[in-house]
Image: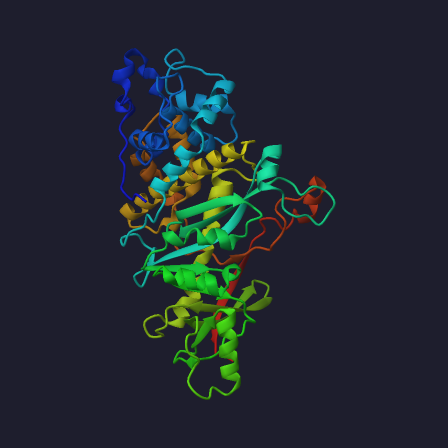
Amino acid sequence: MSRSRFVGAPLSVQCATAGVVRDRSWVWLPGHLGALTRWIPPVLVDEVLDAAGRREQRVRLLPARVVVYFVLAMGLFGDCGYRRVRSALTAGWPRTVVADPSAAALRQARRRLGAKPLALLFDRLRGPVGTTATPGVFWRDLRLVAWDGTCLEVPDSPANVACFSRHAARTTRPAGYPQVRLTALVECGTRALVDAVFGPQQYTELPQARALLASLRPGMLLLADRGYDGFEALRDACATGADVLWRVQSGRLLPVIRPLSDGTHLTVITDRRSGDRLTRWMRRGRHGPMPANLTALTLRVISYQVTVTAADGSARTSTVRLVTSLLDPHRHPASELASLYHQRWEIESAYYGLKVTLRGPDRVLRSRTVEGVEQELFALLVLYQASRRAITEAATTAGLDPDRLSLTIALYTVRLTVINASTAGPTLLHAVLVQARNLAPTRRRSRTSPRCVKRTLSPYAYNKTKGSVGHKTAVTTTITLTNPP
């Protein structure tokens, strides 16, 4: 994984191969992405094309580098067809200067390119982007990261149905669009993608998360919800050298091996065979030494209650139980860890930015082939990561928390710079992002929203959820630590 910064050149010097094609250097003019060209420069695109073996033998009207930028622009202008996306890339020049290929020619160029160059491009851009100077990225010298899964809809074509399949439905009707399951590892402080994998939705989140273990490093604190509760997952995550702070089932039996001074306690999590031996030892009243050769993991258990009080005085309380590899109660207080766990919701904000802010609400991917879906999804991941890099750099320079900078405003600005063919846009982008009127409040409002079906099978069923979709209520949240049973 490369973490170096690439600085893009102006359009006048982007044509690195212009000397070869001489009077046909105009074919390279659409090879840009506006303000994001700094983070996705032509030099980097040429590198991934060479690595993927997709460089052209002779210069065509649609060189491979230009097609890469065209695929990326498809993600920026998701509501536009091929010709309108191409027009956005070439709007800065007279029509007599650049070619106007047909939609069929653009479609064939996408197929020639394939998905591998975009996959390699994402591999170059992914990774943590926050530094020690970026507010909100570290807690007690630990970088906060989280992983979780989500699904995206793809077109209902025979190829997509055969590969990705539909999700199960309770009715006899077909269950909507086929879906791709995406699992990502996100840096909580910046919402940048450390790594991501995707595949057919019938694969559960846990096997996909195992593919992300290689991206964990010592000095990271991994947050996860109850869906990843299990000995093997905890063992493999701790084996990477990273620390964990995971939620587990509140009714799970976790033996109290040793109580700690702050009301938490140490426990031992084992596999099934070692667990049976440990249970028999505890039932004997712990007489004699603990069984030897246990495949076990020593963790610290933190239990607390979360009370959510609405403005009308109604309240509801839920019990949360966490396990962590941070065993020292003095160095890592339980009260701070209980509040820190809710940073896991930053990955939900990241998914909202990827699926709604960038792609558009209720929008299905446009590709009707499996390789096209992979290419389009990698392009969305590249766009999202480049935008997060730009936001984080602007926030770090201004000494602001990246949470206060708007991804929506960043994408609107990038679209304008693409249409204007301005690659000198990073300065403009930074200036727009840090304007006081564009910043989010310093402290977030505490709100809650009911769970409901966002996409129904029947269009008439929308009226049943119309009043609750997006309806948020201001609340007051209280966290109270509880002692172990």
Q: Quadrant of residue 137?
A: bottom left
Res 434 visible: no
Q: Residue at x 39, y 11 (%)?
A: 96
Q: Position of residue 94 (x, y in %)?
A: 38, 14
Query: Residue 342: percent from the left, percent from the top?
Result: 45, 61
Decide if residue 325 is in sight here.
Answer: yes
Q: Residue 169 or 333: which is nearer the viewer?
A: 169
Q: Nearer the viewer, residue 16 or 389?
A: 16
The image quadrant that residue 241 belongs to is: bottom left
Q: Is residue 239 above or below residue 13?
A: below
In the image, 474: left or right of 298?
right
50 left or right, relative to 225: left
Farthest residue to the front: give it.
293
- The foreground one among 443 and 66 is 66
- The answer to which of 362 and 145 lies nearer the viewer is 145
Above or below, 482 against 363 in this view is: below
Image x and y of residue 143, in percent = 34, 57
User: How is this picture coloured?
Assistant: rainbow
Q: How many marks?
A: 0
The N terminus lies in quadrant? top left
